[in-house]
Amino acid sequence: MTDSTQPTASRRAVLGGGITGLGLLAAPGLALAAKGDEAKLAKAIAEGHAATVKRLQDWIALPSIAAENRNYPQGPEYMAQLARDAGFQQVEIIPTSGKPGVFGVLDSGAKRTVGLYFMYDVKQYVDAEWDHPPLAGHIIDKPDFGKVITGRGAVNQKGPETAMLAALHAFKAAGIKLPVNLVLVAEGEEEIGSPNFKELVTHPKVMAAVKRCEGMIIPSADQNETGGVDFTLGAKGIIELELVASGAKWGRGPAKDVHSSLKAMLDAPVWRLVQALQSLVSADANTVMIEGWYENVRPLTPREKALIADGAKNSSEKEMMAALGVKHWIDDLPFDKALERLVSQPTVNIEGLVAGYTGPGGKTVLPGKGVAKIDCRLVPNQTRKEAETKLRAHLDKHGFSDVEANVTGGYDPTEVAEDSRLVRAAIATYQRGGARVSLSPRAAGSWPGATFTAPPVSIPACGFGLGYGTGAHAPNEFFVIESSNPKISGLDDVTKGFADFLYQMASLK
């Protein structure tokens, strides 16, 4: 949601390894092999390819954007229909205090149940910044990747989610019973920090179904540019907020924009906002100065440090710097130490500043209000509540009690056990195709997995999926449909991967 664009396939990925081949159904799980259904599924996936692409294009054409209150209730209604078409027998739109969620159950009579977390919302976009219309879902040729679909939501997260749904369509078309039961929980506010997601999950009907799940996955595209699989054992938490300094609330300076010549006799709310922002971090902005911010930060374990070191060896520092457009890491740290910092450190970041006139040329005004859009990334064992409380206390202590801190969303960090069936099934699916998986303790980005991993739900949750795409939250977002790189999965192979994962979840002890 609030993640900046990342150069890797997944907006939540941190490190990448290598992969030596695909063909994920070439050595299927025992249940699949015994039934001889591999060929039937592959045939159904191939025959459904055009319909799957059309389904994704139609979904891209309907952007639900919570920040703009756009396409509600159309968005949840469309998500509900997608679920029904894929075979879910029970599908309901669940109201919340914000945007509604979508809940569905697919009972195949299996012994085990797997949960699917979907987001049906997308981030905002500016048409003029795109090479192709962001809602058109154009299929274009992209050097080094093949045919890709471009559009808002292509990889974040509608492309991978459409591939997951395509796997369910293939099971239906092939007349094959799903090896697991499924529970779907889809929200429409992920891109604004999931402010009402816990309300959705703890709805009695939803909670009862989710607690039966062996684990919950968010369909994702986790291959990097070279085809490696980046697998994270958790994600940072986040709070997203606006800091607002205004003459009206401060009692000093103008209550509205006035002529800038009056600065000689008036206080300036925007300068007050700047001073408040400066108090949050050190002079180089790389250390958070909020009192008590680090007191609950859990140090990296030896195992986590080993995973990061391994990931550094399997990643290219030069390529990562080039992709990010940077020449130095913080404090000129060596690559492995920079990656340790990426995984282990909480942050306070300015997403944007809004005040006064920002159009062409100048406009001599003294603004009556300034707004800073902020996100704070959290690591174990920090909590959203703790971060909000300490931020407010810091502002008050330093004389900024008039500066508003309006939190719009957020959630705690999430972790999943490396030996959980969910993680083992994901890794087994990758490795059966000859994949070398690079594990990372957690993603630098965020998703609301803590809603599942923490009480009262307390089940494993992680991302899973082959495929490649990038541009989340940015112009020209894309997802690979027909890959020209034998190491990167196209849409059909991504779909096969989801099918194989379900068999793994059914068969692993």
Image: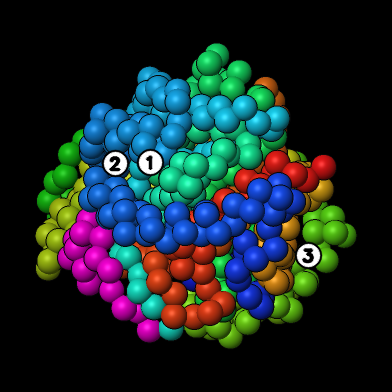
Pick out the residue farthest to the top: 204
Whichever of labels 2 and 1 marks the residue nearer the N terminus, that label is 2
Q: Residues within 10 Å of mark 3 (few under 14, many from 20)?
A: some
Q: At 63% across and 75% down in the image, what residue appears?
A: 21
Whichever of labels 2 and 3 marks the residue nearer the N terminus, that label is 2
Q: Give residue 64's mark.
A: 2
Answer left or right for 488 relative to 413.
left
Q: Residues within 10 Å of mark 2 (few under 14, many from 20)?
A: many
Across and down, in percent, residue 505 comes to: 69, 44
294 in relation to 387, above or below:
below
Whichever of labels 1 and 3 marks the residue nearer the N terminus, that label is 1
Quadrant housing the C terminus: top right
Badge 3 element: helix
Bounds of the magenta segment? 125-143
185 in relation to 142, above or below:
above
Residue 472 belongs to the span the image colors magenta: no
Which amino acid type is shown beneath numbered disc 2? Answer: Ser
359 in relation to 380, above or below:
below
| Residue 148 visible at all | yes
Q: Give residue 95's mark.
A: none
Choose top left, top right, bottom left or bottom right for residue 459: top right
Tell whether label 1 touches label 2 (CB within 8 Å): yes
Q: Give residue 120's mark.
A: 1
Badge 1 element: loop
Q: At 28% across and 55% down in the image, what residue appears?
A: 54
Foreground residue among 183 and 194: 183
Q: Read off the residue under disc 3.
A: 307
Residue 127 belongs to the span the image colors magenta: yes
Which amino acid type is shown beneath numbered disc 1? Answer: Tyr
Pick out the residue farthest to the right: 302
Across and down, in percent, residue 165 comes to: 44, 45
Tell whether label 3 touches label 1 (CB within 8 Å): no
